[in-house]
Amino acid sequence: MSISISPPGTAATAPAKTAVKRPRVLCVDDDPSVLEGLELSLSRQFEVITAVGGEAAVAILKQTRDLHVLISDMRMPGMSGIEVLAKAHELQPDATRVLLTGYADMDSAIAAINQGRIFRFLNKPCKREDLIEAVIAAARQYQLVTAEHVLLEQTLKGCVQSLIDALALAAPNLFGQANRVRAMARQLAEKAGQTRIWELEVAALLFNLGLIGIDPDVVERHLNGEVLSGENKKMIESAPDRGDKLLAHIPRLETVRSLIRLAFHSRRGEHAPETLVLSDRVLALTNILEIANKYCLLEARGYSPDAALTLMRSETPADQAPTLHHLEEVLGREVGATSLRELPLAALKPGMILAQPLRTASGQLLAPAGYEVTESFADRARNVRPGTVIGLVRVLIPA
């Protein structure tokens, strides 16, 4: 079985479904007969996709997920193999890249390795056995890389989630909404077609980390949208730098740090610092983080979804307009799928969203409006001494 995509303007065969998931291999060449030979050699062990030329290959890279191996010819009209491999590294960084060429000159090989970060370099004509061996090795490399990513994501997200759950109990005005922001950001990312969003989720959870240590009254006034001045304003403005210094000690969080810093600069209407290495993906995730944060802040201040959207439409810059449209779609789905209830404190369950601030009888804030109840918070609520919270709690319950 194979999927063939032709150059723009020509017909392409429709994707076929397969019962058994096999490693997915994209073969790129400007010669259809070469692609036919590659498909014949590999189709028994792999799911083969063929692209006639670099432009068609890039289209596949944008549309197809979970690509295991990319095999590209070096010399092609239009986009060269080096350019295709470099683009593949940007669009699908986990895919293992193999260069196949009849021109074994050293300069081209060096350029391919440096720009395309290839795994193997094969000369053609290539023996069928050598080709299959190289693709098997490349598929194993893909499995190793993705397994490492999964382990990293699960470990970091689990550790961060435990930390946020603890901080939400100790400082609800700072971290009470973190899970709500993360859930909103995840939905927006899905709408935008973003994959591998663990860095976005971690950034949403840690967004307010730099506010730790500031007077809680000052923080609450800041989160409520009050205009601060003097020393209080300076402390709030320096929060991103303090948070960044804390995260700098944790490996593999470079993108998380960039997302948080960029979102803060965007909120202030400032340009991104020159020290940050930007990409289209980072900018797209930053827009999602900023929109999710803005909405959840307004929600916590008591704005209805319609009122929050109206205000955001008047303040959102043009580059965030597509993300705001995705928010409108998410809220449309969410509003129709939730119900408003009043429940005893002990009846709170994970996933419910507070529709009003939760305070003790003495006025102490336990959680802000918009807080998504976690399992640890629900356990604590069931064990609160009677009379600590008076009356029922208004919550939104997802369908």
Image: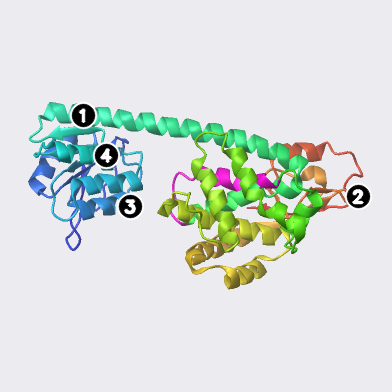
Q: Is residue 209 magenta?
A: yes
User: In the shown orientation, is residue 153 left or right of residue 309?
Assistant: left
Residue drawn where x is 46% and y is 51% of the image: 282
Say few, some or many: other residues with alpha carbon within 10 Å of mark 3 (under 14 / 14 to 19 / 20 or more): few
Mark before the other along the chain sequence, 4 or 2: 4
What residue range appears in magenta? Answer: 192-211
Q: Which residue is mark 4?
A: 114
The residue that mark 3 highlights is: 62
Residue under the point 59% across and 55% down: 264
Q: Badge 4: few (under 14), some or many (20 or more) residues near its Cα, within 10 Å?
A: few
- Residue 230, can we see it? yes
Amino acid on which disc 4 is placed? Asn
Q: Residue at label 2?
A: 361
How far apart are labels 1 and 4 at the CA level?
20 Å
Choose mark 1 or mark 4, whichever is in front. Answer: 4
- Label 1 secondary element: helix
Q: Is residue 212 magenta?
A: no
Q: Earlier in the sequence, mark 4 or mark 3?
A: 3
> In the picture, residue 70 is in which quadrant?
top left
* Residue type at the position of mark 3: Lys
